[in-house]
Amino acid sequence: MNFTRWSARLPGTQRRAAARDDDHSSVPAARAESLRPKTAATPPDDSSEPSAPVPGPALEALSARELLGRLPAPVALLHGPEHRITYVNAAYTSAFGPRPCGVPAAEAMPELAELSLLPLMDQVLRSGTPRTVKSRKVQAGSSYTVTCTPVATGPDGTGGEPGVLVYATDVTDHAEAAERLRTSERRHRETAVTLQRSLLPQDLEQPDDLRIAATYQPGGTDAAVGGDWYDVITLGAGRTALVIGDVMGRGVRAAAVMGQLRTAVRAYARLDLPPHEVLQLLDVLAAEIDASQIATCAYAVHDPNEGHLVYSSAGHLPILVCDEDGTVHRAEDPTGPPLGTGGWVHTSGTIPLPPGSTAVLYTDGLVERRSEDIDEGVASLARALSGAKGSPQVVCDRLIRSLGVTAEHDDDVAVLVVQHPARTGASAELFHNASLELLGGIEAAPRARAFATGVLASWRFPMELCDLGVLAASELVANSLQHGTPPMRLGLRRTDRRLIIEVTDGDDHLPRRRRAEPADEAGRGISIVATIATSWGSRRTPGGGKAVWCEFALPG
């Protein structure tokens, strides 16, 4: 056989020995075993150290069959289109059992079928090119990497049908170690994703006036978690805060910072501050947590009475709003630097969110690609949003698909979709608004009670709820008359789930609940409201005044 073709696949020493023995490998095995090349003594080179003597016979004296027999790896030689067995060495017999010569491999070597080698050997015969399969397992449990090398000569070493030399390397230990490593990485990955998801809202709050859905997809396949987060916070009086943020980098540290920022946002949101003031507080906290971590955040508030989003951004990508007709608007300014930089005074802006429109808040993993500018990614998102219809979750899924985000995406992605539905028919009958301007004076309180009584009766509330609503409206108006300044206004709003009563005035001092002593003639109004209502609160309004509100959950 011609050793030049297949010896290139043998390990180091055997390959060099095979190359030197190439002249002898071309004769039949019986003759090759009887041949012993004449060797002449070569005087040593004085300039080099003498080599150590090699025990056993000289490699040049070994025949092809002897050389294959001495290899520790399983080796088989097959010839012809049926791959008839010509030779198997002792290592092959030890691994797979004895194999009869002259029998097609498909009949006598089931291990080759298990390793998917029969089609591969056909390819080797046709192309004359070696092929290798890596880490294939047989039923016995061992794994092998196998190389199939074409042999140009027949089984007698002279000519005839070409064959294939099969050389297998036992890689069971390596394969098992690799599988253990993959299992460990998969377990760490699952733990990391569980940690990340546990820091995100488990159930999104669903405001009365909005429909909201969110999607988070971890990036890559490694165990490093990211710092993307989102949140929805109901502020009371029908108002809702929407938050999206991103802590740059990956790892547990980024996730820990994200968790602290998200918790802080929820705490600051309960103060019912304007968006820019929330980010101002968050900026100071981010610097205290870890000044080396860069974090961005967009915070927006929706008020159903005003029909727009009031927002502020700390280095985050712009909010997109799609009107009912498909026109997409981008909330460009104002945008400040990322959180933790300090020294920057954030400001708030507005963007319309009329009925029938959809807003999208997202992190950079959705739109950022290494091959294009990020503005192109935002433009692609705007085009995808323009054509996305359906429920918020459907829109989320369509945006993810349209932007080419897959399980192999290399960055975390968070998307928050907010729809302000256009209600008609029976659905619209569940949402009503009524308001009364209060001029002050002694007639303001009776007018407020009469107005509240008539409105609540027209909304067909139960008598008990009407009485509680009138009492709460009376106490809030009385509190405003005593401690506030004009202009004053009483507002009533009903949704499909609650009744909201709100009084605004021109004074910015927020009321607080206190314990009134028995001898006190005042100071019980807010306590009464807090006792009878489901919830209550207050906030400063942009014009320098305040709003005090309470809510009643509707029965059923």
Image: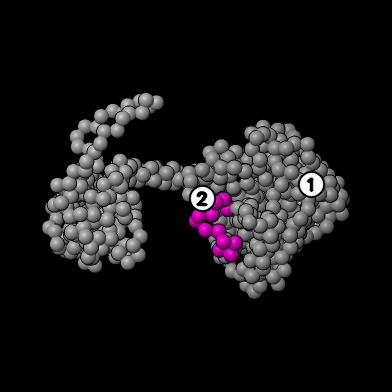
Judge whether 156 appears above or below 296 on screen: below
Judge whether 490 appears above or below 328 on screen: above
Quadrant for the N terminus in the image: bottom left
Residue at the location (59% across, 48% down)? 229
Circle 1 residues within 10 Å: few <14, some 14–19, many ≥20? some
Judge whether 324 appears above or below 320 on screen: below
In what element is the residue under mark 2?
Answer: loop
In what element is the residue under mark 1?
Answer: loop
> Percent position (x, y) of residue 18?
28, 47
Q: Which mark is residue 336?
A: none
> Percent position (x, y) of residue 442?
85, 50
Find disc 2 in the rendering and name its residue: 220
Apparent side of residue 217 relative to residue 63 in the rendered image (left or right): right
Residue type at numbered disc 2: Gly
> Percent position (x, y) of residue 339?
70, 41
Quadrant in which residue 207 is drawn? bottom right
Between residues 405 and 328, which one lies in front from this camera angle? 405
Mark closer to the chain start, 2 or 1: 2
Quadrant for the C terminus in the image: bottom right
Residue at the location (67% across, 66% down)? 383
What is the C-alpha distance between the residues marked 2 and 1? 36 Å
Between residues 313 and 150, which one lies in front from this camera angle? 150
Judge whether 115 appears above or below 81 on screen: above
Magenta stretch? 401-414
Residue at the location (34% across, 62% down)? 128
Find disc 1 in the rendering and name its residue: 347
